[in-house]
């Protein structure tokens, strides 16, 4: 009975100030004014022009993973961190990237406009075209396609399953046509020896062939896929470490601030994610000479756009001891768009954690109400699966320029950058500065997930 009022008080305190319970329980928890004084040490030092200029440098060209342009960005980022006095490491890892083939489809002598599917095998096939509907198992039950070309409509099941079903029925090639206007550029998700050459056609061309077949016309086609294949390349992470400034008073805890430097083909990736990298760099500059008792790691990941490959590679290198010592991971991805919504925090399981608590509290102190929700899709994911509390900081809803050639510097808002840098900087410094006690490391329950299946499931 006696303990009850005390517990109720602790809970109420932690709710009001929005701090992790570990802080609320401290008799010496700093007052709101003291907290703000510490925040201001960071905030007054942030120079948003540095962030903006770094985005300008990084977004002069697309930075596709494994290319020279990504490597140039890696060197730029490493040099910045080194210039602030950080210990830096460039961490290489191997990636497999698919080189798109050239394709052609000739039907009854006409060359039609066609595209390839990522991970289609190469090959040249001439044969009779057979309409197999959506290419489901039911569509193909009892159908013998030996030596033939399957004509399949997009929809209902994944591209990969359509190809596997047709190949199982004996098809030598597959044509998948669109179920909406425009061209169809899909992926089969991963390489698979059971695939046969697969190409796409527009809805109009597909409908026309299907109609002719329905009218009893025999149609022969030639499908050519050449020059495609998986190449091994190297991508890199950049890791910059700020050791605790006073070794004697140091905790053994680690905070990770992450972002990704690669972009998709054709996009300068100013917001996705030069914005996150440049904000991390500025926070590193600001923190460089601040007294801290917690190790801070700034990590810029490569090959995020190919499936979070850099962050998976990085987490793989962490010992169990290091994983246990990382109290939180802040992922900054798309944090500067003029045309996106408000700053939101996303966790993989949709639950709040120590990272969202710290940032929400920093938001209260700096005048921003932060909400949180559930989303993967960035480098916080591998940390979560390693049992580390992590959150993605992003503006939501997303700007229309996402993954397009228009994701350029002119769409970047200094106000958005400033707000993100202040909140994340204040949250990180609250843990890292010597005056606060070590955080209680919250447990995160990882759930297994099959990424290959998720990506392969594209329809
Ligand atoms: N920055 C995006 C993630 C994102 C975009 C999250 C919009 C929430 C809203 C990231 O770079 C990205 O594009 N990720 C991939 C997933 C990844 C596993 C290849 C994506 O979302 O397609
Ligand atoms: Zn991104």
Image (cartoon, grey):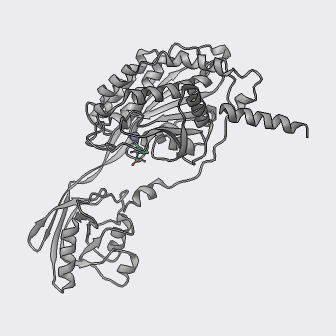
Among the 4 quarters of the image, the one containing residue 94:
top left
The image quadrant where one finds the C terminus is bottom left
454 w.r.t. 361: above or below: below
Instruction: Assign ligand 1 to one image quadrant.
Output: top left
The outermost residue toward the right is 1
Would you say 437 lies left or right of 413 here?
right
413 w.r.t. 455: above or below: above
The image quadrant where one finds the N terminus is top right
Among the 4 quarters of the image, the one containing residue 151:
bottom left
The residue nearer to you, when weighing 204 against 454, is: 204
Q: Position of residue 201 (x, y in %)?
A: 21, 65
Residue at 87% over, 37% down: 3
176 w.r.t. 147: above or below: above
Residue at 26% over, 66% down: 178
Residue at 36% over, 32% down: 274
The outermost residue toward the front is 367
Q: Position of residue 124 (x, y in %)?
A: 18, 66
303 w.r.t. 227: above or below: above
Residue at 17% over, 80% down: 212
The residue nearer to you, when weighing 17 against 81, is: 17
Residue 127 in sight here: no
């Amino acid at each position: 009975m006696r303990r009850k009022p005390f517990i109720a008080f602790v809970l109420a305190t932690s709710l009001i100030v929005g701090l992790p319970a570990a802080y609320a329980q401290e008799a010496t928890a700093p007052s709101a004014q003291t907290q703000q004084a510490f925040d201001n040490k960071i905030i007054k030092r942030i120079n948003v022009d540095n962030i903006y200029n770094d985005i300008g440098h990084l977004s002069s060209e697309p930075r596709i993973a494994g290319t020279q342009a990504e490597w140039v960005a890696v060197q730029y980022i490493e040099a910045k961190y080194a210039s602030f006095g950080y210990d830096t490491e460039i961490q290489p890892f191997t990636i497999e990237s698919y080189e798109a083939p050239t394709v052609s489809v000739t039907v009854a002598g006409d060359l039609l406009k066609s595209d390839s599917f990522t991970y289609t095998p190469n090959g040249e096939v001439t044969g009779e075209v057979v309409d197999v509907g959506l290419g489901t198992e039911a569509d193909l039950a009892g159908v013998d396609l030996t030596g033939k070309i399957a004509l399949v409509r997009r929809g209902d099941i994944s591209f990969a399953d359509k190809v596997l079903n047709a190949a199982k029925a004996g098809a030598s090639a597959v044509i998948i046509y669109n179920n909406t206007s425009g061209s169809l550029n899909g992926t089969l998700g991963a390489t698979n020896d059971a695939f046969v050459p697969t190409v796409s056609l527009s809805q109009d061309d597909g409908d026309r062939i299907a109609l002719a077949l329905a009218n009893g016309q025999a149609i022969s086609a030639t499908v050519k896929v050449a020059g495609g294949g998986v190449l091994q390349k190297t991508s890199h992470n950049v890791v910059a470490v700020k050791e605790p400034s006073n070794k004697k008073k140091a905790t053994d805890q680690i905070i990770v601030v992450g972002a990704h430097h690669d972009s998709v083909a054709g996009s300068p990736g100013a917001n996705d994610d030069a914005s996150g990298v440049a904000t991390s760099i500025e926070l590193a500059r600001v923190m460089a000479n601040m007294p801290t008792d917690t190790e801070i790691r700034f990590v810029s990941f490569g090959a995020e756009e190919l499936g979070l490959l850099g962050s998976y590679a990085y987490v793989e290198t962490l010992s169990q001891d290091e994983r246990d010592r990382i109290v939180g991971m802040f992922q900054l991805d798309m944090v500067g768009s003029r045309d996106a919504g408000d700053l939101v925090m996303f966790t993989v399981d949709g639950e709040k954690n120590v990272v969202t608590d710290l940032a929400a509290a920093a938001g209260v102190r700096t005048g921003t109400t932060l909400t949180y929700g559930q989303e993967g899709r960035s480098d916080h994911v591998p940390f979560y699966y390693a049992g580390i509390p992590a959150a993605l900081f992003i503006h939501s809803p997303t700007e229309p320029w996402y993954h397009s050639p228009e994701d350029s510097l002119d769409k970047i808002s200094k106000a958005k950058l400033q707000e993100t840098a202040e909140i994340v900087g204040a949250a990180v410094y609250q843990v890292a500065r010597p005056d606060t006690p070590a955080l209680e490391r919250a447990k995160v329950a990882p759930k297994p997930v099959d990424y290959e299946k998720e990506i392969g499931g594209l329809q």
